[in-house]
Every structure is written in C-alpha cells, then in structure tokens.
Image (tube, helix red, strand yellow):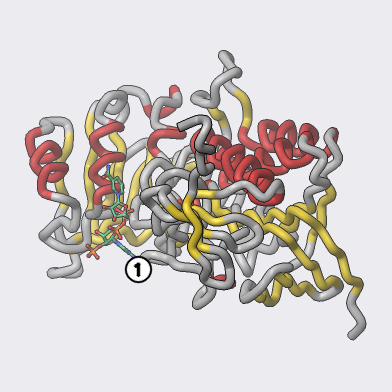
Amino acid sequence: MLTQTLDREVVIIGSGPAGLTAAIYAARANLRPLLIDAPSDAERQTTPGGQLMITTEVENYPGFPHSIQGPELMEAFRLQAERFGTEFLEEWITDVDLSERPFILQTGNYTVNAQTLIIATGASAKWLGIPGEAKVPIGFGGNGVSACATCDGPLPGFRNRELVVVGGGDTAIEEATFLTRYASKVYLIHRRDKLRASKIMQDKAFQNKKIEFVWNTGVEEILGEGNSGVTGVRLVNLQTNETRVLPCAGVFIAIGHKPNTDLFKGQIDMDEVGYLITSHRSTATNVPGVFACGDVQDATYRQAVTAAGTGCMAALDAERFLDHLPIPMPTGDEVTIEGEHVTPDHQAIIEPDGTMIPNHVALSAQDE
Ligand code: NDP
C-alpha cells in the first residue's frame, strides 16, 4: 500500500500530559510539532489523552482550586497545543527505525521522517482482570475502583471509610500508608505471605495501626451497587480456597505498571521492567535526538504534573538539539546534532571523525 510521507523536525508520540505539554512548548517555539497517538481501542487498551481520561476528579493539578475532571483537563491541554499549531495524527504506529536520523515511523497510512522524537507513550496500570474492576458502566472503575491513591484517595467518598489495597510491592505499601490519612482502616490484600516491598517501607506499614494485612489471599470480584459504587470485595484464601466477602468503600489496585515501550525494544536503552532510561540532567535517551518524558521514563512519581514538567523539558531539549547545542546524555557526556561529543569532564570535544579538540577557547598571547 502507498503511504504518504511527512517530514517533521519534532514528532511527539503520546497525548497525555507529557506529550501535550511537549507539543505546547514545541509549537510555541515554531517547530510545528506533529503529535501521533493511537485511536481509542478497548482491545489494545489505548487511551488517547492518557490515564487522566479514566479518572474523575483531579484535585491536585495546580491552578484548579476547585478541582477539575480528568477528561476536561486533557481537553484543555489539547486545545492549548492546537492553538499554537500542533498537528495531530491519529494513527497506530507499526514500526520505528531509530538507527539514524531522520528517524522513521511507519503507520498504516503514513511514513513519518522525524529529525527529533519525543516519546510520551506513558505507562498503563496493571489490572487483575476480575468482575467489577472495569470502568463504569461495566464495572466500578472510576466509582470506587482506582489504580492511583494519590489521585483518588482524598475524594470525599473514601473519607472515614474502610478501603482495600491489592498488591505487595512498594506501590501497594505506599498507597496503603497514604490512604490511612483519610480512611478509617486499610486492608492490604496480598497473594503471598511475604511482601516484595523494601524493608524500610514494610516496617513503617507494619507499625501503622490502621493497616491490616490479609495474607495468601486473592480478590475474586469487586462488589457494588449501581450509582453508589463499591460495597465490598469477594476474597479467596489461596491456601484453603475458602471465600468470604469483605465490606469496603473502595479498592486500590497496586500490582505494578507496564510502560508502553514495546515499539522501542532493542533500539533504546530500558531498565529491566521496560522504562526508558533518560539522563539525570535532561530527557535524552541513549539515542541522540530521541527524548522521553512522562510515565514512560518515570516509575517513581507518576503524576500528571511531573509528566507535564518533563514534557516541557523534552521540548526544550529537542529545541536545543535542533539548534546544534549539546544535550546531556545518560552516559554523562553531551552530544550535538552533528554528532560532536563533549566529554563528561567538559575538557574535550570529540568530533564525529574521532578528532579530539580542547573544549575551551585558546587565549591569545596578549590575554595571557
Ligand atoms: P512490583 O512489581 O514491585 O510489585 C507488584 C506487586 O503486585 C507484587 O507484590 C506482586 O506480587 C503483586 N502482583 C502482581 N501481579 C499480581 C496479580 N495478578 N494478582 C495479585 N498480585 C499481583 O510493582 P510496584 O508498582 O510496587 O513497584 C514498581 C517499582 O517502583 C519497584 O521497583 C518499586 O521499588 C518502585 N517504587 C518505589 C517507590 C518508592 O521508593 N517510594 C514507590 C513505588 C514504587 P508478588 O510479590 O507475589 O509477585
């Protein structure tokens, strides 16, 4: 099939807070960014607009003292990116080639040549896949079921109520501990009798009188009623197979996240889970000209505001790179669009042909 070719200086993949913030900055810098995102597809679990599209109230995004609905916030991001000239392409990317610039992105209808690429494909919370967990109206997702305690824990419906957290890693412990600020009690349901979380976090949770650990237990179903939301969970003891109903007002699933990086496997450095590795001093990946922002490179903070912050950084980094200025790489050295490397100690510049020159202007005899 014939495809149309598009040549762009900045291409952004992903339309969550990171991708759209990168678009706002790149568009205002007159770089005419092209933002590509997959169409909404329940089977492939794509969510254009990112995880805020499946959230209700957002109370912690600065600038909205009376809170804002997640989808409404993302619509505002999108309109702002559009206003400055961002082009949007709703296509599923089937293949990427990052071996040389321009990078080549292949979709069903287009071949996109990108001088710089900003990856903002996010991460998806893992779900248990049990009845009651799906988004409203099929289940209680967004109405008592959540994958983010920081986002949803302080909502009025969870205050002074008994809540359930599922998982045994650092996220589960952190979420359970956070929820004890609001809840009357938090049950932490874990499928084994040992936590995976770090010892320091475990110890704090064991000392927290509001947290009750329920070991060797799985959640079979989330129970609830129409509009009023979650009323309980059906638990199964994985050693005895006995089931019981535990009443609760909310369920927080904290069994890990999966960064959306399958497309880039083997082409960009990732950690063992699949998060893209970026420099501590920039959003640069190990491929010069490819930048990553938002949850796709952040297993720790995972907030809309931190994603937006790194989206801004990625756009500024792409702009600097296109302006032939050096960008700090994960290795510590700095690289320009021409392939010149500034060594980590800043003492030398290595030209693409290997020639090494000092990184300072020679003083004339008169200056000396
Ligand atoms: P992890 O993969 O570390 O833990 C996931 C937990 O969920 C495990 O206990 C696992 O059980 C359980 N689990 C997985 N799948 C299922 C399932 N289908 N049914 C029931 N239980 C399941 O993910 P986290 O999100 O907790 O942490 C990810 C990374 O982020 C880690 O490196 C962590 O250290 C880091 N992190 C650090 C924080 C901090 O330092 N403040 C805060 C949050 C995260 P099992 O143990 O049996 O495999």
Q: Name the amino acid type tagged 1.
A: Glu
Of residues 287 and 65, the one nearer the viewer is 287
User: Whereabouts is ligand 1, in terms of quadrant?
Assistant: bottom left
How many C-alpha atoms fall within 10 Å of the one at disc 1: few (<14), some, or many (≥20)? few
Q: Residue at x 54, y 56 (%)?
A: 335
Q: Residue at x 77, y 37 (%)?
A: 29
In this rendering, is residue 248 above or below 126?
Answer: above
Residue reaching furthest top? 65
Is residue 123 visible in the rendered image? The answer is no
Query: Which quadrant does the N terminus fall into?
Result: bottom right
Beta carbon at label 1 within 8 Å of ligand 1: no
Query: Which quadrant does the C terminus fall into?
Result: top left
Q: Position of residue 196 (x, y in %)?
A: 18, 58
Q: Position of residue 151 (x, y in %)?
A: 46, 34
Is residue 232 visible in the rendered image? The answer is yes
Of residues 78 and 53, the one nearer the viewer is 78
Q: Quadrant of residue 153?
A: top left
Indicate left or right for 101 with 183 as reference: right
Q: Position of residue 188 (x, y in %)?
A: 22, 46
Q: Residue at x 65, y 63 (%)?
A: 42
The residue indicated by pointer 1 is: 272
Q: Secondary structure at mark 1?
A: loop
Indicate left or right for 247 with 24 as reference: left
In this rendering, is residue 154 above or below 166?
Answer: above
Q: Residue at x 16, y 62 (%)?
A: 216
